[in-house]
Amino acid sequence: MAEIDRDKLLDIYTRTMKVNRTDEKFRELLMGGKVAVMYYCVRGQELVSAAAMAALEKDDYVVCTYRGQGEQTAKGIPMEKWWGECLGKATGTCKGKGGTMHITDPETGIMVTTGVVGSGLPIANGLAMASQNNGDGRVTLVSFGDGAANIGGFHEAMNMAQLYKLPVIFLCQNNRYGEHTAYADHTDSPNIAARAAGYGMPGVTVDGNDVHQIYPAVKEAVDRARRGEGPTLVEAMCYRMMGHFFGADFSYMPPEHIAEMKAEDPLPKLRKVMLEHQFTEEQLDAIVADIDAQINAAVEHALAAPLPDVGEIYKDVLEETA
Amino acid sequence: MAQITMTQALNLAIDEAMAEDPGVFCLGEDVSAKQGGGVFKVTSGLTEKYGEHRIRATPISETAIIGAAVGAALAGQRPIAEIMLMNFVGVCMDQIVNHAAKLRFMSGGQTPCPMVIRTTTGVGVGFGGQHSDMLEAWFAHVAGIHVVTPSNPADARGLMRASIDANDPVIFIENILCYGLKAEDPGPGYRVPLGKAAIAREGSDISIITYGRTVLDALAVADDLAKEGISVEVVDLRTIAPYDEATVLASVRKTGRALTLHEAVRPFGTGAELAANIQEKCWDSLKGPVRRIGGTFSAVPFASHLEQAWIPTKPQIVEQIKASLGKL
Ligand SMILES: Cc1ncc(C[n+]2csc(CCOP(=O)(O)OP(=O)(O)O)c2C)c(N)n1
Ligand SMILES: [Mg+2]
């Protein structure tokens, strides 16, 4: 088991709780009818996103999906802008024109959030290709689901990335479901990571609920990419503890699966690790309280923010209309 | 100035853009020196100058090619991606339509996508149903992309430079039958602005609005009809979308008659949009309905005589013009 130093653990814990508290807050707002937008819950996957973002540098690029809240907030998008976008406000990252499925914030490296399954991988290659071309030393991490591993773009991108030794990290968040379809009903191979071998690329499957597995695996992939040794496929096993999107039915999940995922919840596990590393309950609670305060302020700001001007529908179509 | 072919014109434009800006690079199947510089040789000689990182030969992976171009463009580079033949765009439509075209808008202007997608096609080479289609209307129907096609070497050079300069995605359609056309080289740095049509020939009786290879047919017909005292104006759109509405409307207001002409199939083609817009905006100047000519509404056939029957022909153009003028 690779050791992680205390500073990094604290960093990962803080990012994890930011993701988790953001998710909780979003669900609370939706439940209370305060907002009505599409939101893809990340409950159960917080640690994967947080650990992955903690393995990157500030300048590194990220491409994520509609279920990208974890990457977005853990990478550091300012909360006011993030909430502004999710609520369709003029103050959002994209002036309210992207929304929950298309959060973009180049300042923090969130380059694309795609709503099309598997489309992020080929684009991540291009960001990495630019870094390879201009030698800026950045790496690109692209996050996607287990379902995305079955679309053509995944295979094209993996092959191309390995061919050119692009500085990319392919992070498959295997939450065992693609919408309502369980892993075993969409894929007959035992895991996704083994596919990497077919492209001559290293691939690893790790427990995404164990900080001592997920962080070192992504960090090693990041280091390899930065050394110019090419891409890695990291498959993080995790659970989607809610329906596909907020409010979606998940009665199709068998009770055994629900019991299993509750037992594997990454949050109590991470808290235990933190306590083992001499962080105190008070310290950890204070971190969460601070995050909650920040989130509450950001939500208030976003709720009060102006709507985008209607004229925005004609803007940003082409440069001429900017 | 020297005479150049359309192939050379494109090569020169790409070459000078690459020399000026290290962020310009090409990617596509068979494009590098090892494969002979592209199936139609447009990137010939460039690997030797700029290396394999900037003339990247790719696997046969259209989605990965366009995706890579999108990503590189987001990172500030200016990729020129080649899709060997236009029909293969079907493989990568998601990257073009949902990503390249929309990322500027969906990001609120933060992530423009400056990239050129070069592709080639054309009826009349015997390539059959899956290698010949003109699919410009597919892209003209999507906000956020320029659709460009040159009809001659000088425009090819100028439009390519302008396309590489553009800060948005450009679909650049090359017609296989036009690669060998020769004309005077407009010289280094020459640019034809996007969105500007050319009056390829002035006339007063009818305006033919066309682009690409069919400009040549329109000009030939105009020559023939001049002998009969019919004066045909030929508008070469050069940029199909968003097109130069002002030039088109001014031409039609002047002549009072319009005929749209393209190789692509007629139903729901760009001619339909042009005709509708002309009728809306030039109604008072029109002396008759706008006429449309396009390819036959079937797959492009293989046998040469079928292919020639499929494609718009000069006699058809003459017939439509005369019908419009009441001279049949
Ligand atoms: C190309 C495409 N097909 C279908 C959909 C509809 N869809 C949205 S999410 C999803 C499931 C994706 O599953 P997975 O990749 O495992 O990601 P997860 O939602 O579990 O994070 C589907 C089918 C889509 N967005 N894009
Ligand atoms: Mg999944």
Image: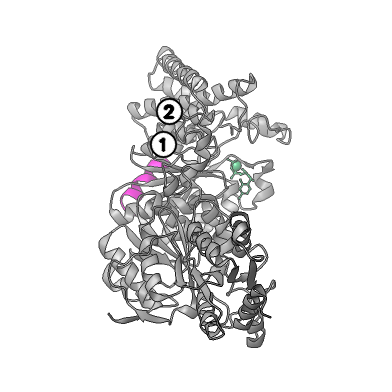
Asked which secondary structure carries label 2, the reply is helix
Q: Residue at x 46, y 21 (%)?
A: A298
Q: Quadrant of ligand 1?
A: top right
Residue A154 appears anywhere in the view = no
Q: Residue at x 58, y 71 (%)?
A: B262
Q: Residue at x 41, y 57 (%)?
A: B115
Instruction: From the viewer's side, name the closer residue of A157 and B213.
Output: B213
Magenta stretch in the rendered image: A217-230
Which residue has dot 2 on it?
A: A15
Helix, strand or loop: magenta stretch:
helix
Amino acid at pointer 1? Met
Q: Is residue A300 above or below residue B212?
A: above
Position of the N terminus of chain A, as image quadrant, is top left
**Mark 2 Cα-neighbour bin, 10 Å: few <14, some 14–19, many ≥20:** many
Which residue has dot 1 on it?
A: A53
Q: Which image quarter: residue B275?
A: bottom right
- Residue A117, given in percent of the width and then of the height, sits at 58, 47
Position of the C terminus of chain A, as image quadrant, is top left
Q: Chain of mark 2?
A: A
Marks 1 and 2 close (CB-CB < 8 Å): yes
- Residue B86, given in percent of the width and then of the height, sits at 54, 69
Task: Measure how far apart labels 1 and 2 are at the Cα level.
Answer: 8 Å
